[in-house]
Amino acid sequence: MFAITETPSSAPVLQRARPQRETPGENPSPGLLSLATAVPEHVLHQPDVAATMHRFFSEIFSRSETMAGIFASTGIRKRHAARPLDWYLEPRGWSERTAVYMEAGGDLFVEVANRALTLAGCSAGDVDSVVFVSSSGIATPSLDAVVHSRMGFRADIERVPVFGLGCAGGVTGLAIASRLAQARPGSTVLMVTVELSSLAFRLDRPDKAHLISTALFGDGAAACVLRTGERGIALVEGAGEHLWPDTLGIMGWSIDPVGFGVILEPNVPSFAATNLKPAVTGILGRMGLAPEDVGRFVCHPGGTKVVAAIERAFGLDQGSLDHERGVLADFGNMSAPTVLFILERAIAHGLPERAALVTMGPGFTASCLSLAQAA
C-alpha cells in the first residue's frame, strides 16, 4: 500500500482541467492533462536516521564537525522509503536490492500511473505511449513492461524506458513525452518516473559522498498524462538540455558487485551558482524566450545549499523557491520525481503565465522545460 501525497489544506485542490481544443492554425503544443505523485508508506524521520548513522559510523562523525551536523543542515524533516529503516542496516547485495526495486517500484508505478490517468479522465487502455524514467534500479524488461498486465496497457503500446538521467530525469522525461505527443496529435502519452534511491545505501562504503546521500535521498514517484489538441493544466512550449564538457565526475553511480555507489562532488552548489543561469538562458533562447519571460522557476532542489545557489544564480530573493524547500523538508531529494512534486504544489497555488522547470543531473547536465498557462 502506498500513500498519495496531498495538497496542503490551505491550497486549492488540484482538479483535472476541462479540455480545451486548440484553434485551427495554431502551433500544436502538447497539453499537460494531469500530474500525480506517490510515495512509499515507510517514513524515515530525519532525527531517527541521524541517530542511527551516528551509531553505525561514530568514528567518522566524531572526526569531522561538518559531517556531524550534516543531517541537521539538510532542511529535511522526513522522507519515505521502500523499506523500514532497519532493513537498510543489514548487508544487501544486488539480488535483494533488485527484488525490492521490482516489487516496490512496480507498486509505485501502478499507484501513481493510475492516479494520473484518473485525473486525466482516461484509462490505461487509452495510452498510446509510455515513457518510463528511472536510474535507481536495473530491470530488463523495464518496469513499464513488468506492470503491463496489472495496468491493462494495450498490446500495441509504445514503450520508451529511459535510464541514467538521475535528478534531471523528471524534466527530460516530460520533454520526451511531450515530443511524442506533439509528433502524433491526439495520441495519449503517459510519463512515469519511479526512484528508489534508498536502495543505494551502503554499509560497506562509509565515505563522505555516501553519508551525505544518506542524509538527503528519499523514494518517490510521479506521473503525467499529455495529449496534443487539449490544453489541460498547462501547455508544454518547449524544452532543451545543456551538457558541460569534462564534468562526468560531478554526479552519478559507480557499479560494483554489491550495488550502486554514489558519485557526488561537494561543489555542486557553487557550480550551480556560476553555471546554471547561462545554460538555462541558452535553452530558453532556443525557444525564443529569456529568463525575464519566466514568472516562476520550478527547480529540483538537490539540497538546501543548492536551492540557495539557484536563487543567487537567477537573482531571486532569498526564500523565493518556497515550494522547493517545502518538498525537500517533507520528502527529501527523490531524484527525478522531485521537481514534479514541486510543480504539483506550484499548480495548486496557481501557475503564472509561464513557468520553467529546471533540473541538473549526471552528465553533468541541465534540463529545462517551459510551461505556459492553458487558459
Image: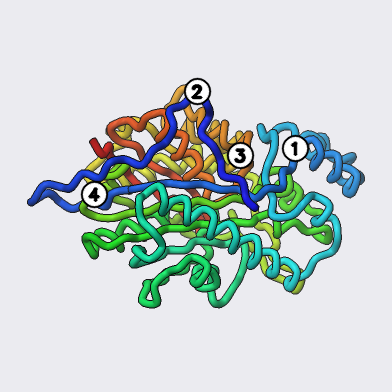
Q: Which residue is mark 4?
A: 230
* Three-letter amino acid code at the position of disc 3: Gly
The reply to whether residue 240 is in sight is no
* Three-letter amino acid code at the position of disc 1: Gln
The CA distance from mark 3 to mark 1 is 14 Å
Q: Which residue is mark 1?
A: 46
Q: Is residue 253 left or right of residue 47?
A: left
* Residue 141 placement (x, y as % from top left): 54, 76
Dot 3 falls on a residue whose secondary structure is: loop
The residue lying toward the viewer, choosing from 280 and 190, is: 190
Q: Which residue sits at x=53%, y=64%?
A: 164
The CA distance from mark 4 to mark 2 is 29 Å
- CB-based contact (under 8 Å), mark 3 and mark 1: no
Q: Which of label 3 and label 4 is nearer to you? A: 4
- CB-based contact (under 8 Å), mark 4 and mark 2: no
Q: Which residue sits at x=60%, y=60%?
A: 107
Compared to residue 48, the image places residue 261 above or below, namely below
Residue 303's label in the rendered image is 3
